[in-house]
Image: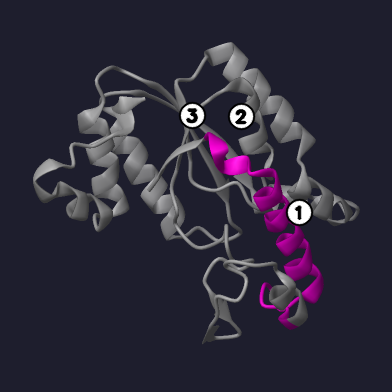
Amino acid sequence: MEVFYPDLAGGKQNNFRHASFFQRGLWIKMISVRRLKILQILSQHLDYGGEERIAVKIEDALAEQHELFRYMGSTRRLLGQTPLAPILVPWRAWRNPQVLRDLEHEQRQNRYDLWLVHNALPALSPVVYEVARRERIPIIQYLHNYRLSCTNGFFLNHGKACQRCAQGGFGPAWRTGCWRNSRLASGWMGLILQNMRRQDVFQTVRRWV
C-alpha cells in the first residue's frame, strides 16, 4: 500500500510529523496514485468540537481527488430517547451489534479501498476494527486526542497531568474516576481499552496520523 507513504526524502519527514491534520490530509491526497473509494468513520461527541471540524476539512480536501463516504455514530444517539436506553450503553460501547452489521453491509456493498477512522469510542465501539480486520480493509487512523491510551482522552486527571494508564492497565482511571467524574464510567472505558490492547485490534491500522 505505497499509496500511504509520503515522499519523506530531503527532510520532509519532520515536516509531515509536525504538520496540521488539514495539511496531512492534503499530502495524502497529493501522493495518492489513483482514485480511491474511502469510508470516513467518526463517532460524534455530545458537543460539536474541533475533532469534527477537522474531519470535515479533511473530507473536503480528499473529496477533490477521491470518492468519500461517511459512516457516523453519535453519543447522543447511543444514549437513546427512551428511559431504558441508557441501560444498554455499556454493552453497546463494548460491542455495538448495529454498527457491526452496518459496516459489514457497507463494505460488501461498496468495496471501499480503505477506511479513514477518526474515532470509534464510545458510540461505535471496537467492532470498527474487528470488521476491518475480518474484511481485510486497511485503516488510516487519525489521533485527535489520547483516547486509545487514556479513558478521558486528555492525559489529565482532575486537572493534573497524568499518564499512568498509558503503558499498563487502567486501574488508576477506575480508582480516581477521571472520566466524567465517575469510577463506573472510567472503569468500564478502561476495560474496553484494555480489551482492545489484548486483542491487538490495531493490526489493521496501516498509518497513524
User: Does 98 appear in magenta?
Assistant: no
Q: Secondary structure at mark 1?
A: helix
**Quadrant housing the N terminus:** top left
* Picture layout, residue 136 above or below residue 75: above
Which residue does the image show at 18% across and 53% down from the upper left? 15
Mark 1 burial class by Cα count in 10 Å: few <14, some 14-19, many 20+: some
* Picture layout, residue 166 above or below residue 20: below
Q: Which mark is residue 107?
A: none
Q: CA distance from mark 3 to mark 1?
A: 30 Å
Q: Which mark is residue 133?
A: 2
Which residue does the image show at 65% across and 25% down from the upper left? 134
Q: CB atoms at circles 1 and 2 under 8 Å apart?
A: no
Q: Which residues are magenta?
A: 176-204
Q: CB atoms at circles 3 and 2 under 8 Å apart?
A: no
- Amino acid type indicated by mark 2: Arg
Relative image position of residue 62 (x, y in whole percent)? 30, 32
Question: Which SS type dominates the magenta stretch?
Answer: helix
Please state which of residues 146 and 57 is positioned toward the viewer in this rendering. Answer: 146
- Amino acid type indicated by mark 1: Leu
**Horizontal placement of 35 versus 100: left or right?**
left
Residue to which mark 1 is pinned: 79
Relative image position of residue 98 (x, y in whole percent)? 75, 33
Name the N-terminal-most of marks 3 and 2.
2
Q: Secondary structure at mark 2?
A: helix
Query: Could you tell me how many numbered marks the image carries?
Result: 3
Residue to which mark 3 is pinned: 138
Which residue does the image show at 76% across and 80% down from the upper left? 175
